[in-house]
Amino acid sequence: MKEENYIVFDQYLQNGMTFTEKIAFEKQLSEEPEVAADFQNFKEVQAQLENKFTVDAERNAFKENVKSIAGTHFKPNKKVIKLKPWLYLVAASVVLLLGLFVFNANSNPNFEDYNHFETAHFVERGHETTSLKQAEEAYNAKDYLTAIPIFESILKHNKTAEIQYFYGISLLQTNKIQEAEGVFNELKLGSSVFKNKALWGLALIQLKQKEFKVCKEILLTIPSDDENYEQVQDLLNKLD
Amino acid sequence: MANNIIHSDQMYIDGLASNNSAIIQSIYKKFVPKVVSYIRNNSGDEDQARDVIQEVLIVIFNQAKANKLQLTCPFDAYFFLLCKRKWLNELKKSSNKGVTISDEFISTNEPVEELLAQTEIFEEKQQLFDLMFEKLGAKCQEVLKLSFTLKSMEEVAEKLQVTYGYVRKKKSLCTGQLTQWIRENSLFKSFKIK
């Protein structure tokens, strides 16, 4: 009974029925829910089989591709180089010597290595609003002490996330740590595009003060789809 | 279901389905680091993260190829939670050891949940299918394989040196056997075949 059904199911799916047979089968499906359910399952398995075999080559190519991309993404960090026994002694002394020089310099990341904030572009050419233009020029010239009061006066009547952000950076650059933290903390809660940038700013505040643990904790809150995530990841790696 | 709007991140799904290296690379660059740090923070290491990620990508590929994957939420959340849940399952399976799990990434977002459930059911069905297929006799496996890779059943018959009628029947019955086993086994599972 079942076996016959399967033969009929397949015939129907392969278009191997005469018109009358087809009508009869469709009538049976509408009248016998159990057969209809069986047919549904059969159809699904047929589709799985088709997928299994027709996509097989593509699937293997995909697996290989993913493997090789993963290979370049996860760079092997534990390289084992076999040495002849006597070489160990030489290697050990070289490592010791190198260590004396390198260890201190290399142990922790440095604020200046990551202190590359973007330049400001507040004003389109030809649309100069004086104070914005002045702030932009002072900021881009790294003349933060001049930029800060201009930012403050702009923020009084026009508080935008962008101006706040560059104001925060200027405060950080001039070691006004607490004020900078305040500005970034406010931005962090907003929904603007400067939200993640503010988190990065907060992380760098900690880095500047060599608070590596806190710095790392803040970095981990930056979502991985952030446009500067490479930088975040790089710093995270150095902090590990 | 009418309001299921496809998310613009569908491009990642389509990119995986077409084995697009640039898309795969950008997934590794943008979304993988978060998964790795999650697994590392939850009793795993980088190698284990690497395996979980590959498995999840293959499941997504398979589902996309079966034309059953329409992203209604950001890829980031979907991908991260799939990896996370796969990892937590592995921990559960492998351990009586005390495991520390930090669970700050609970999703209460409905489209994500629905999509995760779909993918996980797809994966379970796929696993059951693969398992049952392996249970079939060698002859059945061969007939099925040839039926779906050669152009016509006549060619299959010729290749196996049997009659056309025989391969047609054999193919139907083997598919039927597979259908029956899958149905019987899925009764014990938490899901039903539609």
Image: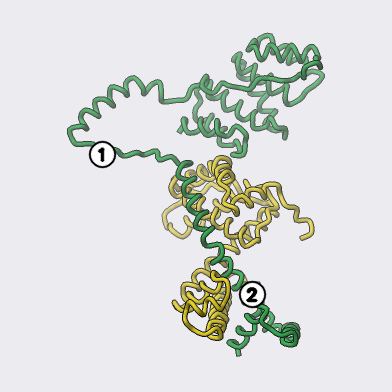
Are there few (<14), some (14-19), or many (20+) residues within 10 Å of tag 2? some
What residue type is disc 2 on? Lys
Residue found at the very far left of the displayed protein: A86
Q: CA distance from mark 1 to mark 2?
A: 57 Å
Q: Residue at x 57, y 71 (%)?
A: B151
- Chain B: give its colour: yellow
Q: With respect to residue A176, does B10 lie above or below? A: below
- Quarter that holds the N terminus of chain B: bottom right
- Quarter that holds the C terminus of chain B: bottom right
Q: Which residue is mark 1?
A: A82
Q: With respect to residue A174, does A161 lie above or below? A: below
Q: Is residue A150 visible?
A: yes
Q: Where in the figure is residue A189, as x and y percent of width and height?
A: 69, 33
User: Could you say which chain is coloured green in the image?
Assistant: A
Q: Which residue is mark 2?
A: A43
Q: Residue at x 67, y 58 (%)?
A: B114
Secondary element type, mark 2: helix
Total numbered labels: 2
Are there few (<14), some (14-19), or many (20+) residues within 10 Å of tag 1? few
Q: Where in the figure is residue B95, as x and y percent of width and height?
A: 43, 57
Q: Is residue B184 visible?
A: no
What residue type is disc 1 on? Lys
Q: With respect to residue A16, does A66 lie above or below? A: above
* Pointer 1 or 2: first along the chain: 2
Q: Nearer the viewer, residue A38 or B65?
A: B65
Q: Chain of mark 2?
A: A
Q: Nearer the viewer, residue A197 or B97?
A: A197
User: Left or right: where does residue A114 sit relative to residue A121?
Assistant: left
Marks 1/2 same chain: yes
Secondary element type, mark 1: loop
Q: Where in the figure is residue B164, as x and y percent of width and height?
A: 55, 83
Q: Residue at x 76, y 25 (%)?
A: A160
